[in-house]
Structure formats: C-alpha cells, structure tokens
Image: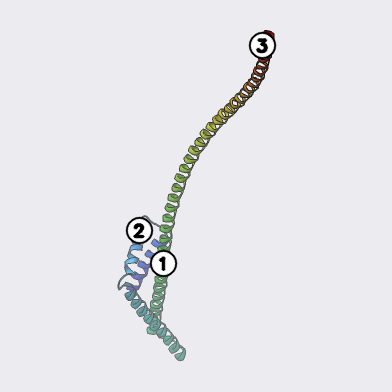
C-alpha cells in the first residue's frame, strides 16, 4: 500500500510539475490525459477513489489516536505499537499529500483549460477585429474614391455652370445691344415718318400753289 501511494504521489507530482511548467509538448499531453479522465466514467471513478482514500485516511488517523491513547494509559509504547504508529502516520501523510496534489492538479487543469479557452476567444476576437478593420478600411477607401469622384463631378458642374453663366451674360449683353438698336431704329423710323409728313404737306402746298398759278 505504501509503495503504491509513493508511486501515485510521484505520478501526481510529475503531472503537477508539467502543468505548472511548460516543457515542450508534455503539458499538452498532460492536459489531454486529464481531459480524457474527466470524460465518461472518469469523474465517477476518481470520486470513488477519493472517497476510498479518505476512508483509509480516517482509519489511519483513528489508528494513530488509538495507539497514542493506549500508550498514555499504559505509560509506555510497545515496539509493535511504535512500528504500527509510524506505519499509519506515513500512510496517512502519503494519503493526505495524494489527495492534496489531486486537488491541486484538478484546479490547475481547470484554470489552464479556462485560460486556453480565453486565448482561443481572444484570438477569434482579434481575427474578427482585424477583419472588421480591413472591412472598415475598404469601405473608407471606397468612400474616399466616391468622394473624389463626386468632387470631380462637382468641379466639372461648376465649370459648366461658370461657362453657362458667361454665355448668359454675353447673350444678355447682346439682347441689351439689340434692344438699343431696335430703339434707335424706332426713333429713326419716327423721324422718317415726321419727315414724310412734312414732305407731304410741302407737296400739297406746292400743288395748291401750282393750281392757283394756272387759274
């Protein structure tokens, strides 16, 4: 029993060391082994073993106390009781260390598994953030290109508008000039009509004088 406990304690110490210190791929192997132990019937078997060792630990402690009480009553401890006391004490110590290391290994495995999952989530989140950043950069580039295109279109429209404005001003000047010309022609036409009327009057006067002269 004691040799078996020493072996179990050595194995547990090795596993705990591999979990605490990363030595090549050994930690991953230890984690995979513990994962397999915690699947299927593994947890129930481990709990049964822990309960059995707890019972043996309680029995060993009870035997130690019984031997001590017997020695107190007798005032001395026989060599056989000393051997049994040391044996039970060693057995109880080994079982206690074994249970403690089992608990430590369980907690180390739990927190390492949680840390690995968190790293996976962080890595996935980092990839998602990088993807979103690339998508955002692509959209910004696309928006920048569209803005440049719109700016060019606006500049072209402004240029056309300026050109149309100049043409409109030129046409307005032409219209004003044409209107002034028409006004001048109208004035000239009025003057010609007045002159025509005057000539008609002069003609009539001359005709009447001619008729008076003939008579």
Mark closer to the chain start, 3 or 1: 1
Name the residue beneath numbered marker 3.
211
> What is the x, y in percent for residue 45?
32, 75
- Location of the C terminus by quadrant is top right
User: What is the crowding at mark 2: few (fewer than 14 residues within 10 Å), some, or many (at least 20)?
Assistant: some
> What is the x, y in percent for residue 115?
43, 61
In the image, is residue 55 above or below residue 18? Answer: below
**Alpha carbons under labels 3 and 1: distance apart:** 146 Å
The image quarter containing residue 43 is bottom left
Q: Nearer the viewer, residue 98 or 85?
A: 98
Name the residue beneath numbered marker 1.
110
Q: Nearer the viewer, residue 52 or 213?
A: 213
The image quarter containing residue 60 is bottom left
In the image, is residue 160 above or below residue 139? Answer: above
Marks 3 and 2: CB-CB under 8 Å?
A: no
The residue lying furthest to the bottom in this view is: 73
> What is the x, y in percent for residue 186?
63, 23
Q: Nearer the viewer, residue 158 or 22?
A: 158
Name the residue beneath numbered marker 2.
26
The residue lying furthest to the front in this view is: 215
- Location of the N terminus by quadrant is bottom left
């Amino acid at each position: 029993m004691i040799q078996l406990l020493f072996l179990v304690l050595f194995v547990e110490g090795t596993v705990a060391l591999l979990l605490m210190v990363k030595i090549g791929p050994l930690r991953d192997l230890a984690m995979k082994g513990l994962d397999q132990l915690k699947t299927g019937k593994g947890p129930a078997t481990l709990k049964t073993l822990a309960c059995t060792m707890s019972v043996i630990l309680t029995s060993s402690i009870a035997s130690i106390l019984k031997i001590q009480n017997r020695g107190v009553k007798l005032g001395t401890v026989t060599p056989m009781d000393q051997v049994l006391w040391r044996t039970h004490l060693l057995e109880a110590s080994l079982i206690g260390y074994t249970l403690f290391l089992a608990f430590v290994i369980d907690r180390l495995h739990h927190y390492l598994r949680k840390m690995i999952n968190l790293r996976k989530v962080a890595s996935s989140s980092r990839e998602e953030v990088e993807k979103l950043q690339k998508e955002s950069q692509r959209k910004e580039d696309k928006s920048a290109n569209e803005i440049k295109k719109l700016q060019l279109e606006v500049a072209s429209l402004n240029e056309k508008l300026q050109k149309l404005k100049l043409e409109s001003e030129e046409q307005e000047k032409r219209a004003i000039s044409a209107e002034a010309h028409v006004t001048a022609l109208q004035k000239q036409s009025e003057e010609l009509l007045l002159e025509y009327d005057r000539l008609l009057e002069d003609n009539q006067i001359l005709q009447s004088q001619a008729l008076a002269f003939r008579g």
